[in-house]
Amino acid sequence: MHLQIRSDSPTGFRSPARRKTNKTVIEAEKGRKRREEDIAGIRRIRREETLFEKRGGIHTNQSCDWLVEDVQHLWSEDPDEQLEAAVNMGCLLTLGDPPIDEVVMTGAISRFVEFLSMEDAPQLQMEAVSILTNISSGESRHTGYVVGNGAIPSLVKLLSSSDDDDIREQTVGALANIAGDSPRYRDLILHHGALLPLLSQLQPHSRLSMLRHATWCLSNLLRGKPPVNLEQNLIHSKDEKVVKNTCWALSYLADGTFEHIQAVIELGVCPKLVELLLYPSDTVIIPALLTLENISTGDDVQTQVVIDNRLLPYLHQLLTQEDNKEISNLRRIFREVCWTISNITAGTESQVQAVIDADIIPFLVEIIHNAEFEIMKAATWAIFNVTCRGSQDNIRFLADQGCIEALCQLLDNPETKLLLICLQGLENILRVGKADQEKGLNDGVNIFVERVNNCEGIYENLYNLLTDDDCDVKDRASTLCRRLRAGNDVKDMD
């Protein structure tokens, strides 16, 4: 689940601490428009295969001969004729070279906009919104025809009112195409109140295709100048559902490229997101925390933004507040807090120092000793990153806080990756002890070697690891054993 983005670790393997989750965000193209061929695939109403054979094998110019009859049927009072005509015209627009101009010139757009409001005919609504999506994915003038015929308010209303997942997803695609055309159309969509119903589509239970399209649409709405004041929805709304939906939307948007993360930062929402970590309801805390976690997966400058907004003291508070929380939510909060900290400790020395100054390390050590596996693993990565990114003083501090004993405790764990970071973390600590020894400190003794030797079961665990099936584990265990055998020179072993 945790993808790895750091390749410059001094350990030689990459830390997933600055991680990305498995949610996928669709990136808008430069022109912020794309033909959504996969959206067409969700249409529930399709004619029989014969219809595709009948139309698909005909050249576009010949296909347009069918338009005259279809347009007449569009204006019929017979619902079956309306639906058949809409399906036929929709099929034309899915051809390799769609006759968008010809469809526009029939004047049918206004009729399709009317169909959007026919709540008792969801199949017709679906065909209409699919056609408007395809037309708006053409050139800018095509989008202008859709907007000029009043499609935006009808699409926004449909997004707010429809109970059909396919219709709402297709509607999101249409709005995304229109919003991507120009800031003027973007502002028009926002003016008609599309933001809140769009945010409500971005829920953990939403299907992946909806998350992709809604996040893409949201990114189009948040681009351009002047920027959208999304912060207002966070700061001034008294409605918990609005705040929750806004946070989920931001979390999905930030779970993308560095450019997506920067777009969220530039919205100015980070201070409020940090404040929301102490919101009375976990339904807000969790998406706010996930958003900040995703931002912390960015580059060092982006990570510094959340540090500068006092994220660490709030994370410290989350680790100490257990009252009035459901156990499942508490576990998730602890896990995501630890992953966020690991993202920060994968950064610069000053960022590692900020974590230490926030007095978070003792909690991580306690978590390693006592928490369930998924939380413990995240805390272990946070400690490991300190041994890789921190200064020698930072590593000495880890030893003083009991990190050696915590890492040694995990050497009987069956997970290979966790074993590797524990072994490497211990080796990194021993290197600092060796450096101090060479300086004549601590009476010429590597005191960290002694601390490892005193850990219960250490040699039994190392002996077992020397026969592990994984070659990397065996190599790391062998190196650690040689270091423990009395002060071998670090340079000789590297």
Image (cartoon, rainbow, N blue to C red):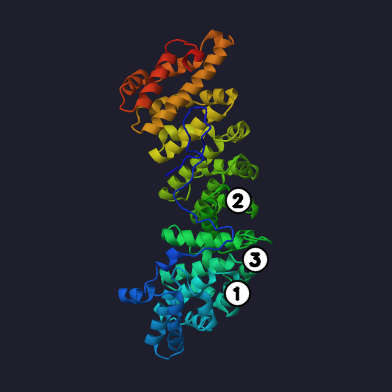
Q: Nearer the viewer, mark 2 or mark 3?
A: 3
Going 53% across and 23% down the picture, which residue do you hit? Answer: 400
Please state the horizontal and vertical placement of residue 142, each as a whole percent of the image.
Answer: 57, 73
Position above or below: 178 against 301: below
> What amino acid type should be assigned to the residue bearing mark 2?
Glu
State which tag comes first along the sequence, 1 or 3: 1
| Residue extending furthest toward the right | 226
Residue that carries the numbered disc 2 in the rendered image: 275
Residue at disc 3, secondary structure: helix
Q: CA distance from mark 2 to mark 3?
A: 31 Å
Please state the horizontal and vertical placement of residue 475, each as a whole percent of the image.
Answer: 38, 22
**Residue 144, labelled with which disc?**
1
Q: CA distance from mark 1 to mark 3?
A: 13 Å
**Residue 183, labelled with which disc?**
3
Q: Nearer the viewer, residue 399 or 461?
A: 461
Residue at disc 2, secondary structure: helix
